[in-house]
Image: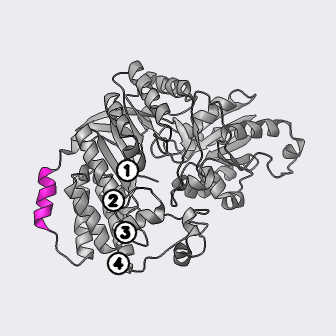
Amino acid sequence: MNVVLISIYELGRQPFSLSSPAAWLKQTDCNISCVDLAVQSFSECREVISSADVLAFSLPMHTATRLAGGVVKKVRAVNPAAHICFYGLYAPMNEAYLRSIGGETILGGEFEEGLVSLIKRLATDVSENSGTRPHQPEPLISLNRQQFLVPDRTGLPPLCKYAHLQVGPGSMKLTGYTEASRGCKHLCRHCPIVPVYKGAFRVVQRDVVLDDIRRQVAAGARHITFGDPDFFNGPTHAATLVEALHGAFPDLTYDVTIKVEHLLKHRELLPRLRDTGCLFVTSAVESIDDHVLQIYEKNHTRRDFLECVEMFHEIGLQMQPTFVVFSPWTTLKSYLELLHLLVELDLVDNVSPVQYAIRLLIPDASRLLELEEVQKLVGEFDQQSLMYPWVHADPRVDELQLNVMAAVQKGQSLHESRRQIFQRVWDLAHQAYHDSVSEHLKIAWSDHAPPRASVPFLTEPWYC
């Protein structure tokens, strides 16, 4: 049996969501191929896709899921008979849509065991081979505790095809990616992980993670991104892992994602991150408005964020905050307040420009829909965009979001620096507020912010 694992888009990373199941499926009696359409053209993958018995699409994020419909049409044109499977975080949340475009098996949560079960079933199930398609016996969402296998990356494009870490002008590091845990202990209302994991998280065994990193270092990686939703969901696991990593590869650097609440709760571990090679910590701050933070149930406040920034400065770590800047509760004034605060905190170079344009996404099964206030805001679920649409009460805010996104995309196409793109956003925000750009503040942030190259960042510009 020929099985093709397909990634559509995974934030510029070499897909863990292909390499992990590839290791599992290679233990079965089938031929495994991996296709990453983010860096490979459909035409160069056409032959392997056309000969597949099973086509399994990884859907770890919203962008990939939205693109899936068009990709499936191309796939069906060259291979109308293959069994279509969708797996990953966004698969169970969009089950109805995915079945409408041809999905026969949908797997979420800990999907590796489900994929193995699917392949074994198809190899022996006469009804499947005869064209009768019964409902899948595999669970839609599995939260089983798995003994993970070391990801098999041999069938993937090389690391040089993916996002790099820029550490200075013209200085790049080849970057790998791994996961030390999945899921999350927390129940933030806007988070897409919550409808699937519901507060559960699963640890990837330390030896598996270290072996995966070891293989990527052998392939040229000099920096590793840990893609855990929150690296401090298991603080002991995280601390022992980075100690072992630094002992094995003292020159290797890495970055992690940790929520504000955990940064404060486990602040004693931050020097250990710094000393073991952590270059920056991404943290989903989301908003500086305490009312909005309460709606999202982020379990932190504006004051907590400010405390974290000060703490990072004292420790000597870089924070890269992320935001959901446009929401039904955003005002032109609150947007300006965020920009001014980033200048005041000297974080302009730490924020990826796309963050200035992120609009609240409300997918199916979002906990935000539990709120009567949100139910009154949204329209009917849109299967094309895979979300509940909402329109801001102030049309100037929606217009600003569109203008900011266009400005960010233009700046990125011109290879402008983060501070240059920030200036575009700054001007648009003040214009929307019917105010003039403050020359004093413009000079302040451009003159006193640290040099762009001093803040390391990944070269992939997109976010979700």
- Residue closer to the observer: 265 or 108: 265
User: Of the residues shown, which amino acid type is indicated by label 1?
Assistant: Pro
Q: Residues within 10 Å of mark 4 (few under 14, many from 20)?
A: some
Residue 396 is tagged as 4
First-in-chain label (1 vs 2): 2
Tally of marks? 4
Label 2 secondary element: helix
First-in-chain label (2 vs 3): 2
Where is residue 377 shown, x and y percent of the image?
Answer: 51, 76
**Label 4, label 2: how far apart the Cα atoms are:** 25 Å
Q: Residues within 10 Å of mark 2 (few under 14, many from 20)?
A: some
User: Of the residues shown, which amino acid type is indicated by label 2?
Assistant: Arg
- Residue closer to the observer: 33 or 451: 451
Where is residue 78 shown, x and y percent of the image?
Answer: 68, 48
Highlighted magenta segment, given as a residue range: 437-448
Residue 302 is tagged as 2
User: Marks 2 and 4: in contact by CB < 8 Å?
Assistant: no
**Label 4, label 3: how far apart the Cα atoms are:** 9 Å
**Label 2, label 3: how far apart the Cα atoms are:** 22 Å
First-in-chain label (3 vs 1): 3
Residue tagged 1:
461
**Label 3, label 1: how far apart the Cα atoms are:** 17 Å
First-in-chain label (4 vs 3): 4
